[in-house]
Amino acid sequence: MVEGCLDDHDIDRGGSLLDDMDEALASESGLPSTSNNIPLMRVVQSVKHTKRKSSNVMKEGWMVHYTSKDTLRKRHYWRLDSKCITLFQNDTGSKYYKEIPLSEILSLEPAQNYSLLPDGANPHCFEIATASLVYYVGENLQRPESSVTGSSILVRCRYDMMQNSISKLIIRFDIIDRFDIILNVLDINSVYQIFPDEVLGSGQFGIVYGGKHRKSGRDVAIKIIDKLRFPTKQESQLRNEVAILQSLHHPGVVNLDCMFETPERVFVVMEKLHGDMLEMILSSEKGRLPERITKFLVTQILVALRHLHFKNIVHCDLKPENVLLASADSFPQVKLCDFGFARIIGEKSFRRSVVGTPAYLAPEVLRNKGYNRSLDMWSVGVIIYVSLSGTFPFNEDEDINDQIQNAAFMYPPHPWKKISQEAIDLINNLLQVKMRKRYSVDKTLSHPWLQDYQMWLDLRNLESRINERYITHESDDLRWHHHAQLSGLDYPMHLTNSPCGEVGQGMERYKEKEEELETLSERVSEL
């Protein structure tokens, strides 16, 4: 994934850094600009860091600095690029002394604190503050009393975002006449760094960019919406998405960090994940997924969906693009995202508003009839179908009802001949034109295709890896332990929460209950 260049605030930093580096470099004009002769100073030992020169260097040159923890001035070859400032040993080598990520820079100010300046030394030009350190950079050959101080030194920049892409930025040196708006914009940029070249995707309302939380270094996804481009109705839909995300706290749903708003834009900050399910399907060797992986992913989707439906929330736009992967593993954790179409629908309620993506939509929506939460279950059926076959189940030229009745059309020998009948049976029970016949979340989870020991092991391994149990339940452990014993399969004791003795006692109780049920069923048969 390509990580991009500076956001507003970082380009503000970057722009100011360019100006201040120019100023500092100019004030050090007495020093040769390309000389490798380094003045006498403490030698930095054990420098093992190396890196190649970035292809997008914005400014470079020899600079001196001291810090709030070490007042000895050091001289290095500074390079500023779109991601960080790197202090190299010289202007040609790859060894560097220190790297300052732009995401860690909390402020960039003109020289104002001279308390650490040694007697008789020339003052610095500007100050870069991070959470743990302040860098006093440059050397002003003029005395402090004769130099220009305060905000007049720091050239204030205003950056106008182009409507199409925030990566197209115009730098204008200007007096800020809309300071209130700038402050609002800086609210997000003081907390997060946005990478405009790292486009993660585009949703219903805006483009999603990669970003980073400055204090923790945590990666985030930031959806940026230009309010001027969207009518009031769509703006209310966006607020609906944010409100729903704020009410959901589940490991299977993408986490909303926060929202920032200016008169012109809305910034929605969410956790950053690694690709989506569609990408996984298309990039697989055969352009489709094996049953084992499909079961693993679909079960997670259903568990998240069960949480949504419990809260009377219907996603209304379930599709592989809206199922995000938390890692690049073969068996990743997945999370639902993009709740722009989500609706609050009670168990027996119906809605009629237009929602969703046609290829995954149930026929009642396409025909403008009322729909309920079973709409999501149709979408799950389509997701299973496209995952296993790499194709959509229907075309636009024929009636869906007719296509469903035609098994030869729905399930051609390639690839369905090699796919289990249980999978086909579940798809058929989800792609039911009549809503009342369509499987619910719980009924789908109980279907034989998803009651699979290997899948349970895969899910338990995932839960063990992320140290959170929310997909499987402890009440199933004994059942699968019993199944493993009967089938002569290995049972991983480390994946259960109970000690071996308790498992043994539980197995005895489990067998007793099974025997009681068998006896009861025999009596019922006799009656």
Image (cartoon, rainbow, N blue to C red):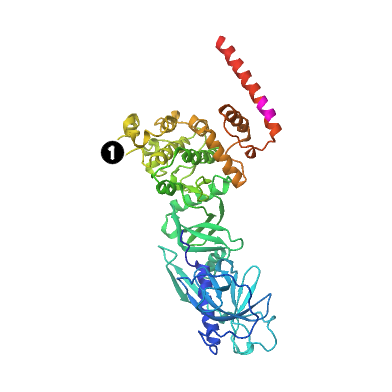
Q: Is residue 215 left or right of residue 300?
A: right
Q: In this rendering, is residue 192 above or below 516?
A: below
Q: Is residue 246 left or right of residue 502?
A: left
Residue 221 visible from this viewpoint: yes
Q: In this rendering, is residue 384 above or below 134?
A: above
Is 356 or 28 nearer to us in this picture?
28
The magenta-colored residue range is 504-508
Q: For the C terminus, which image quadrant?
A: top right
User: Quarter-wise, where is residue 286 in the image?
Assistant: top left
Q: In this rendering, is residue 30 above or below 57?
A: below
Percent coordinates x, y for residue 255 in the rendering: 56, 50
Is 192 or 160 nearer to us in this picture?
192
Q: Residue at x 47, y 67 (%)?
A: 5
| Residue under numbered circle 1 | 397
For label 1, the crowd category at 10 Å Cα-Cα, with few meaning under 14, some 14 to 19 and many 20 or more, is few
Q: Is residue 504 left or right of residue 49?
A: right
User: Quarter-wise, where is residue 202 in the image?
Assistant: bottom left
Q: Residue at x 68, y 77 (%)?
A: 70
Percent coordinates x, y for residue 489 in the rendering: 57, 32
Is 121 or 142 nearer to us in this picture?
121
Residue farthest toward the front in the current orientation of the protein = 488
| Three-letter residue code for mark 1 | Asp
Q: Residue 506 in magenta?
A: yes
Q: In this rendering, is residue 94 above or below 24?
A: above
Residue 527 visible from this viewpoint: no
